[in-house]
Amino acid sequence: MSQHIVLLAGDGIGPEIVAEAEKVLTQVNEQFSLGLSWNHELLGGAAIDAHGVPLPDVTLDAARKADAILLGAVGGPKWDAIERSIRPERGLLKIRAELNLFANLRPALLYPQLAAASSLKPEIVSGLDLLIVRELTGGIYFGQPRGIRILENGERQGFNTDIYSESEIRRIAHVAFQLAQKRNKRVLSVDKANVLEVTELWKQVVTEVSAEYPDVALSHMYVDNAAMQLVRAPKQFDVIVTGNLFGDILSDQAAMLTGSIGMLPSASLDQQKKGMYEPCHGSAPDIAGQGIANPLATILSVAMMLRYSLNAPLAAEAIEAAVGRVLDQGLRTADIFSEGTTRVGTKAMGDAVVAALAG
Ligand code: NAD
């Protein structure tokens, strides 16, 4: 049966970058006879303008039925003043929750051609290729009880609950080990087990799950050390698995090791490996409509989608290789431009990837 994708362009630069990703999708669909079909739906500010809500039922229904979803980005100043519960970002949180997308995959891959863009020395980051697997639907961001209360002495007190059940830890650990099997067969589990009981359990359960993957080496690290090692010697890592809070911070830190947020794709998967794929960056309202946004993070999100949800690894590899060739040709959008390279706009970058695929 043919597989179907829902494209959610969203707001700001979203429509511009998704248009280039769609060109690439069209090319690989033909070139690799994938038989994929797709349609567009609205999410975020665009959906608020058309339907008054950031996640219309028609979008959610289409996303539920689809095999995969490709998102540009949502949000922008136009919708910042409206009531919090119907802001664009709420649409994004709701679709992730409704589809139970508990596994967030954030690769930090530095193309050697862009090593100079990193704030770290090229020899420390050149060739960096690590994958952070972050638990996305549990932990302290969702734990109850939570709130701000007034104590008897009149002082205000804020509190949250960091909570993980065994099954939540088990399922994200399986995702990490299975991904490591397809990579360099190493998993690092990040915790703070010396202080937090919830992560003591995390460490125990990940260790139990590791028995099912004898071909993958498991190690553990406290989060403070992991943050330090990510800056000191990031190439030591393969797959890093961690909870929602630590993953949020470490994945942004890892992203910046690569120097450009315009290059980084991400995936959020459910238990059946259905997923939503999106660039790590936001809707960049400051450059929207100018035709200068970097479409490569979205194009690389298409590659992740083909690999993880649509079972087309060869097409995924072809896209990643095509991006490498375009960088070899010296083509750069403004965010990754440096002396001696050729500055191009969003469309020209997308066209160059399509040409590299076809050539
Ligand atoms: P941002 O990622 O949109 O932009 C940060 C900076 O990076 C800006 O200077 C922007 O021009 C630049 N940038 C981002 N993507 C780029 C690209 N592809 N090419 C070239 N330059 C790029 O973050 P922000 O400015 O904090 O947020 C802007 C809006 O995006 C907000 O409304 C925010 O809520 C939303 N947002 C959405 C998502 C999402 O949809 N997943 C994620 C983060 C932020």
Image (spheres, helix red, strand yellow):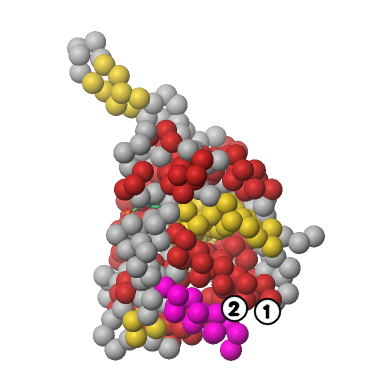
Total residue callouts: 2
Side (left or right) of 173 relative to 286: right
Q: Please tell me whether residue 34 belongs to the stretch shown in magenta.
A: no
Give the position of the N terminus as an image quadrant.
Answer: bottom right
Farthest top residue? 152
State the image coordinates of residue 158 (x, y, percent, origin top left).
29, 26
State the image coordinates of residue 215 (x, y, percent, origin top left).
62, 63
Q: Is residue 240 above or below residue 146?
A: below
Give the position of the C terminus as an image quadrant.
Answer: bottom right
Q: Secondary structure at mark 2?
A: helix
Identify the residue shown where x is 54% and y is 34%.
165
> Circle 1: is it few (<14), some (14-19), or many (20+) Cα within 10 Å?
few
CB under 8 Å between callouts 2 and 1?
yes
Q: Amino acid at mark 2?
A: Ala
- In this orientation, does residue 175 appear? no
Identify the residue shown where x is 45% and y is 75%.
347
Q: Quadrant of residue 333?
A: bottom left
Tell which tag, 2 or 1, sits nearer the viewer. 1
Q: Which residue is mark 1?
A: 31
Image mark for residue 175: none
Q: Which residues are magenta?
A: 346-359
Q: Secondary structure at mark 1?
A: helix
Q: Which residue is mark 2?
A: 318
Q: Is residue 160 above or below residue 254?
A: above
The residue carrying mark 1 has its beta carbon less than 8 Å from ligand 1: no
Q: Which sits earlier in the primary sequence, circle 2 or circle 1?
A: 1
Chief SS of the magenta region: helix
